[in-house]
Image (spheres, rainbow, N blue to C red):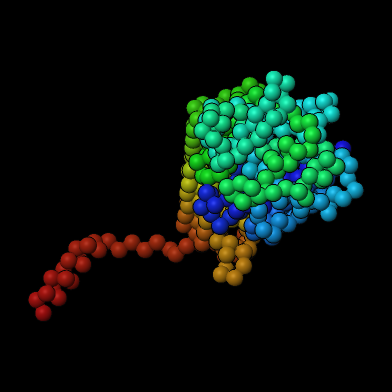
Amino acid sequence: MVVVAILAAGRGTRMKSRLPKVLHSLGGRSLVERVLESVEPLSPSRRIVIVGYQSEEVQAAMHSIPSLEFVEQTVQLGTGHAIQQLLSHLEDYTGDLLVLNGDLPLIRSETLKEMLQTHAQNKNAATILTSHLPDPTGYGRVFCNDENIVQQMVEHKDCTAAQRENHRINAGVYCFRWPDLAKVLPHLQANNAQKEYYLTDAVTQVGKVMAVDVEDYQEILGINDRLQLATAYEILQKRVKEKWMLAGVTLIDPTSITIDETVELQPDVIIQPQTHLRGNTVIKTGSHIGPGSLIENSQLAENVTVQYSVVTDSTVQTGSRIGPYAHLRGQVEVGAGCRVGNFVELKNTQLGDRTNAAHLSYLGDTVVGNQVNIGAGTITANYDGVKKHRTKIGDRTKTGSNSVLVAPITLGDDVYVAAGSTVTEDVPNDSLVIARSRQVVKPAWRRKSVENKTTDQHK
């Protein structure tokens, strides 16, 4: 049995932000959410987040996570002081406590499982996660014997010059036998440069403590400033892109592409340079995305093409072509075999199969049937200044260039809209609608204008 405690009380002053450090986003999720995800496969009996700075904001950001508990550290006096706040909450608990920092977003679940197994097999009072860093500056140092039994732990600021030559660092992840830790916590002292109560002091007092080295030191890189946040994002992206390339996805110029972990891709998808895939996006086999495209929270079926376009919160069916320079947003549904072309914007609109809107159009709050052709410059005027209205366009209907359909309006099946028309009334099936002023031609207009101007000058 294990209870998880996540330390999330600090402000993170080096982030230079009003936002609490643990709420800063990394690849679409906050730092603390990523830590919570890493412990989920461990099936903890309880998950407790220790909050402090902007505690209400931190709790609100995680309100949708079920069965999550919050304990407040009103004054931030160090990691030991933070865990002291659990004494009353775990009064009768006899299992293990896993403690993680809330700014450790790259830790893998497999690493935590190995740590817990080592803890149980060796019947340790405490087990800590460690690693050998190329540059350990800023990290507390861990000193062990040949059997990885911890002899001493010293915070970086309290290290002597000789101690700083040791590159084995404390990753800020601990597993304690809770009854042993609970006896020690009330007796911690703040005899250090920071005048804080360190959890590392408790580690050396609970009994047998063993270190477990993580092979990939990048897993335990903490986030203290924006530079480290950017470094973590690079590491995360490398993991994600390697995963998809090994699964049969082609990434052309991977360094220019970003992909959220929540994205799902199928084999034989091709992602061109400068393309960014966000949120709960699914792209199926044979689709070709980019260059220069953003796909967010959208589902793209087989053999879809998207070029230099933005697609958000939308669905595109098999064989449709989007772009270049198209914008789909707000629950757009594009049918199979459609074309949405140059400088076309769709908002909350459904296109039937084999329908084309090739260029320079806006369709908002519109339902379009099958085999419809939207002429260049067609606009659905969906907003009357107070609220939005819907437009319905039937099967096989064709709108001429520079048409305006003033909603609410319905065009039936097989309707033809003459170029330049402003249509304000419903049109029945199999009709031609012309809604424009009659053309007037005045011959020799320029000559008469010049004559009139000359006469006026001699008056």
In the foreground, 283 or 145: 145
User: Is 157 on the left or on the right of 201, as rendered?
Assistant: left
Q: Percent position (x, y) of residue 410?
A: 64, 59
User: Is 353 on the left or on the right of 270, as rendered?
Assistant: right
Q: Quadrant of the C terminus?
A: bottom left
Q: Percent position (x, y) of residue 114?
A: 76, 27
Q: Quadrant of residue 239?
A: top right
Q: Which residue shows up at 48% across the image and 43% down it?
A: 325
Q: Percent position (x, y) of residue 423?
A: 55, 62
User: Is 449 on the left or on the right of 346, as rendered?
Assistant: left
Q: Is residue 206 above or below residue 148?
A: below
Q: Is residue 401 above or below residue 441?
A: above
Q: Which residue shows up at 57% across the image and 28% down it?
A: 166
Q: Which residue shows up at 22% across the image and 62% down it?
A: 446
Q: Residue furthest bottom?
A: 459
Instruction: Specify whether residue 175 is in view.
Output: yes
Instruction: Specify whether residue 281 is in view.
Output: no
Q: Which residue shows up at 69% across the image and 40% down it?
A: 200
In the foreground, 5 or 407: 5
User: Is 386 on the left or on the right of 100, as rendered?
Assistant: left
